[in-house]
Image (cartoon, coloured by chain):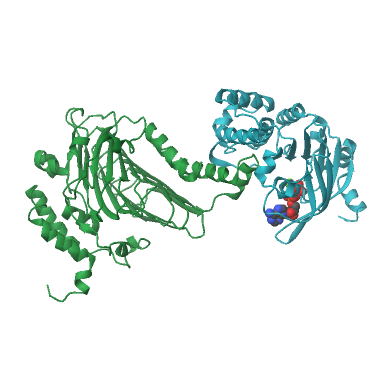
Amino acid sequence: MTTTLTATTTRPEDRFLHAFEAYAGEVLNGTSEHLATLRRKAIERFSALGFPGRKSEAWKYTPIAKALQHPYKIDPMPAVPTLNEASLAAYAIPELDAYRVVLVNGRFVPELSAGSDLPEGVVLTSLETAAREHADLFEKYFAYYLDFENEPFLALNTAFARDGFFLYVPEGAALERPVHVLNLIDTSEELFLQPRHVVAVAPGATLKLIASGHSQSNARTFTNSVMEVFVGQGAEVHQYDLRLEGDRASSIYTTQAYLEGGARYTNGTLTLGGALVRNNVQVRFNDQEGEAHLYGLFLGRGTMHIDNHTMIDHAVPNCVSNELYKGILDDQATGVFNGKVLVRPHAQKTNAYQSNKSIVLTREARMYSKPELEIYADDVRCTHGAACGQLDENGIFYLRTRGLTLQQARAMMLLAFARDVLDQITIEPLRAYLDALVAARVGA
Amino acid sequence: MALLEIRNLHARVEEKEILKGVNLTVNPGEIHAIMGPNGSGKSTLASVLAGREDYEVTEGEVLYDGKNLLEMDPDERAREGLFMAFQYPVELPGVNMATFLREALKAIREHRGLPPLSPAEFMKLLKEKAALVGLDPSLKQRSVNEGFSGGEKKRSEIFQLALLEPRLAILDETDSGLDIDALRAVANGVNKLRAPDRAFVIITHYQRLLNYIVPDYVHVMVDGRIVRSGDKNLALELEEKGYDWIKEEVGLVA
Ligand SMILES: Nc1ncnc2c1ncn2[C@@H]1O[C@H](COP(=O)(O)OP(=O)(O)OP(=O)(O)O)[C@@H](O)[C@H]1O
Ligand SMILES: [Mg+2]
C-alpha cells in the first residue's frame, strides 16, 4: 500500500479492511480454526469485490454506497447493556407461547434466552458457543452453501462473524412452540452490526421461527445480518421476520434457505420500521419435491426506503415456489421489489408463481418493481404479475356512501390490502399482533 | 317539507353536460320511479345525489330535508339518511362484509344518537335483514361483493338498505339481472321497508318491477331532463309504446 492518503483511505471498504486486521488477532480468531480460515477467505473476497457501486444492477434503486459513507463504528463485540424483563415485555407478542431468544446489538444473551426447557437434542445457543461446543454441527452448516464469493455483504459478514444465534432441531423433532428471537438495538454509539445466525432443521423436523427487530435506543446504526437456514429432507420451517426498528436503524438482512427433498419452507418478511431496509431472501432447492412460500408486506412512511430482493433457484426438477409481496408507500417513502426466479435447464416440472402489488398513497412516494424470470427449462409453469397503483376510488366512494368517513374508508381498504399477506401467517397470536400493528399504522 | 327537492340541476363530467335541468320533488313516504332510455342521465343523477366527485354541478340546487345536499360529503349524506343501491356495486376484496356493515351501522347509529349494538345484537340483526331479502347468510362472511353473482350483488344492496334504515333510498336498476324469484324477493324487501317517513327513488327500465313495487309517481328522463311525469299508468304506456313518442313530443326526435 502507498502512503498517499485521501482518496484511498476514505473508501468505506478500507475502514472494514483495517478493522479486520485490527481485530483478527484476538476478537475474531479465538473461536475455531475452521472459522479463522473462512474469515480470511471472506475478507479477501470482500476486498476484491468492494461495496456495490452506483452501476450495480442489484442495487440500482437503493443508494447503498451513499449510506455506507457514514463512519459507523465497526466493533465485532459491541457492549451489551443490562436489560430486565420489564424492558423486554414491550416487545413480547401477546398470547404467544414461545421459546425466547434475546440478542442485543447482535450478541446472544444467554441469561435472557430459553435453555433448559428445550426438547432433547435441540441446540439453541450463541454462534460462538456452537463453534466451541458443537463443532461438528457448526462446521457442517456454517457458511457451507453460503455464496459469499459474489456477494460483498455476505463476505463481509462472514469475515466478521462473531456472534448471533445457532439453532439446531434434530431429526424428526417437532418444536411445538415457536422460537421467538428478539433482536434489540440498544446503544448510544453509531454501530455497524453484523450478526450471523444459523438455523438447521434436520430431516423430518419442524420449526416455527419468529425474528423481530426493535430499537431500544435512537443512535444511528447499520446492521448487516445474515441468516442461513437449512431445511432437511421432508422438514418444515415457517419463518417470520419482523422489521420493527426505529427510523435511525438501517439494515441489510440476508436469509439464504436451502431445501432438501420434500422440504417445505415459508418465509414471511414484514417491514414496518427502519430507515433504509434491504431484505434479501434467497431460496435454493437442492433436491426435488421442495416447496417454498415467500410472503412480504412492507409499509413505508416518512423517508423510509424498503427494498425486497428475492431469489429462487430452481436448481432441480419438481419444486414449487410461490411469492406474494405487497407494499403500501406513504409520504416520501420508496419501495423496491425485485423478484428473481431462476429455472435451471434440468429443472423440469417447476411451478413458480410470483405476485407483487403496491399502493402508492402520495405523489412523492415511489415504487420500483422488477420481476426477473430466467427460465432455461421447457416443461415448467411460471407466472408473475406486478401491479402498482393508488387506492381504488370507487371502493372508497362505496364505503363512504354507507356512512364511513374518508379516513375510515381508506383504512379499511388498506387493511384489506395488507390482510392478503397477513392472513397467510399460520401462528395465530403473531397474525393478530401484526394485524393490530398494521391496522394502527393505516389508521383503522 | 319535502324530503328531497331538486331544482334545475345541471351537471357535467369532463366538459360533457349530462344533466340539463332536472326538477324533482320527493316527499316522505312516497315512491318515485324514474325511467328513460340508456344514457339519458339516470345513473348520473343518482351519483350526483350520492356525492360522487367525478361530476361537477354547474347550476341548480338540491335540498335534502331543507339542507343543501351538495355541500355535504358522501359519508355525511349517508349518515343523514341517504342510501344508494348501486347499478354496479363495486367488489372489495379483503373487506369483510360483516366488519364493514358493523362500522357503517355504528357510524349511522352514532349520528342518530343511538348506542352501538352488542356483537350478539348485531349478528341477530344481520340475520333478520338477510332473511328479509332472501340473502344467503353465509355471504356476510365474505369480502364485500367479491365473487357475488349479479343477483347476489343486488340483493346485498337491498340487504344493506334494510340494515341501515335510510330516510331516502335511491335504487339504480336494482331489478336488472335478477331472476323472477330474486325480483320478487327484492320487491318484497322494499315493500316491507316502506314507511311514512321513508321515500324511494327507483330507477328502472322495466315496468315489471312496478307491478310489485307500486310507485306513486313515474318520471321519464330523456337527455338529462325529466320530460314527463305521471302515475303508474305512465310506465304501462312506455312499456307498450317505447320512448320515441315522448322524444318526439319534447322535440328530441329519435
Ligand atoms: N364518468 C363519466 N365519464 C364520461 N361520460 C360519462 C360518465 N358518466 C356518465 N357518462 C355519460 O353520461 C351519459 C349518461 O350516463 P348515465 O349512466 O347517467 O345514463 P343512464 O341513464 O343511467 O343509462 P343506462 O340506462 O344505460 O344505465 C352517457 O352518455 C354516459 O356515457
Ligand atoms: Mg344507469
Q: Is residue B243 left or right of residue A220?
A: right
Front residue of A23 and A127:
A23
Q: For residue A160, which quarter of the picture? A: bottom left
Indicate left or right for B78 with A190 as reference: right
Residue B88 in sight here: no
Q: Is residue B26 left or right of residue A239?
A: right
List x then y, in percent, for residue A103.
23, 42
Front residue (pair A314, A189): A189
The quadrant in which residue B129 appears is top right
The residue located at (23%, 47%) in the rendering is A105
Report the residue that reaches farthest toward the right.
B249
Query: In the image, A116: left or right of A294?
Result: left
Task: Tell me: residue A240, above or below residue A66.
Answer: above
The image quadrant where one finds the N terminus of chain A is bottom left
Residue B170 vs B55, above or below: the answer is above
- Chain in cyan colour: B
Residue A252 percent across, percent down from the top left: 29, 53
Whole-percent x and y of residue A42? Answer: 16, 57
Q: Residue at x 46, y 45 (%)?
A: A441
Q: Is residue A291 above or below residue A38?
A: above
Residue A216 falls in image quadrant: top left
Q: Which chain is green?
A: A
Residue A83 place in picture, x, y as percent: 24, 40
The answer to which of A265 and B195 lies nearer the viewer is B195
Question: Total marks drawn?
Answer: 0
Instruction: Judge whether residue A17 can be spotted in this image.
Output: yes
